[in-house]
Image (tube, rainbow, N blue to C red):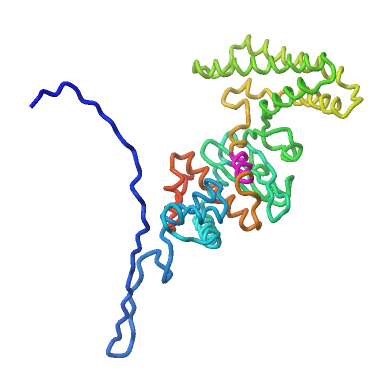
Amino acid sequence: GAPVVGTERRQVFDIPKIEVKVTEHRLVSVRCDCGYISTATPPAGVVSPVQYGPNVTAIVVYLYCGQFLSKKRTAEALAQLFGTPLSAGTVAAMTKRMAAEITESGFCDLVKAGPLRAPVVHFDETGMRVAARLHWVHSASTDRFSLITVHERRGVKGIEHAGILPRYLGVAVHDAWAPYDTYGQATRALCAAHALRELVAVTETAADEQTAAMAERVIEALRELKAAAEEARDAGRDAIDAQAKTTGLDGLRAAILAEVAPTAERSTKRQTTHHALFRRLRDRFDEYTRWVRHLYLPFDNNAAEREIRMIKVRQKVSGFLRTQHGARQFATIRSYLATAVKHDIRFIDALVHAAEGKPWLPSAA
């Protein structure tokens, strides 16, 4: 009967024990007086005498394509977590069916059409071992879509297989890799963060103090412009202060030009690399600094590099993919998941929809 003088709240978040539930459907057959036999129609999605349901399929594909476990480790995880024994072959079959469902739903067409209408698209590529050979993963990303493709070739053939850059008319953000320049119809915005990393490497490897010092000067000028752009965005302005922009660009250009001639000697391979960098910064100055004049453009190419980084994580965790078909299925599902997240759809929800034969589709608008 004592009065309550205080309440202390303590909460425990936990997941209840999950066990596999088996649902049996009995399809009754009856014979008519005329001899015709009629059999009940099975529920939607029940196509085999024994099969796994959409939640199991979604979890399997999430572990395999979302968390990059190998097929064997994915099967072991299901057995340990839920008491559901699977084989590596079953994991492969589930992945194949889901990739087919996603493709047949029209998702791939939508995710290719989306970037073509976007004002800015990010492009990048990286190597991946497939069938014991080097293949190439290409990414095209916007704030709403992510397209990931796999091809045997890195250059023009791989880019054309992806099907975005050859038809794109907006601003293409990428690094200074030469094959991108094959397609001149797009406006180019080269990744300044990539240039910044190259400049940092110059400061660490230059044989003379002058080259290192000039690289530091270019780095400082780039960072000052980046800070001015961020300040303008934070303040809600659509442009950098005119005086700061002019001063910053002039300082950056002067720092680059000051180092082109001194590095022209190129007596070593390293000096040749340094000279090529400063000459490229000079010759493509407008492309490297387009983000200074148009604040809606990014300083870096992180939007594409994030997708590529996941491919590298996959290789580190589980090694190479065994077949080209498997690699393309993996790329299709990664495109599906990466695009779903950009629309605030959880991985597992998107995968359950696909496992039920009704893949989530982004708006075409």
**Residue 47, position in %: x, y?**
42, 68
- Magenta highlight range: 307-315
**Residue 175, position in %: x, y?**
70, 33
Horizontally, residue 223 falls left or right of residue 201, namely left
Image point 86% across, 20% down: which residue?
A: 263
Horizontally, residue 281 falls left or right of residue 187, namely right
Q: Is residue 117 above or below residue 251?
A: below
Q: Which quadrant is home to the N terminus?
A: top left
Between residues 197 and 141, which one lies in front from this camera angle? 197
Q: Is residue 181 above or below residue 51?
A: above
**Residue 197, position in %: x, y?**
70, 26
Q: Is residue 207 found inside the magenta-colored segment of the image? A: no
Q: Is residue 311 found inside the magenta-colored segment of the image? A: yes
Between residues 121 and 63, which one lies in front from this camera angle? 63
What secondary structure is the magenta-colored segment mainly? helix
Q: Is residue 30 above or below residue 224?
A: below
Which image quadrant is residue 221 in?
top right
Which image quadrant is residue 185 in?
top right
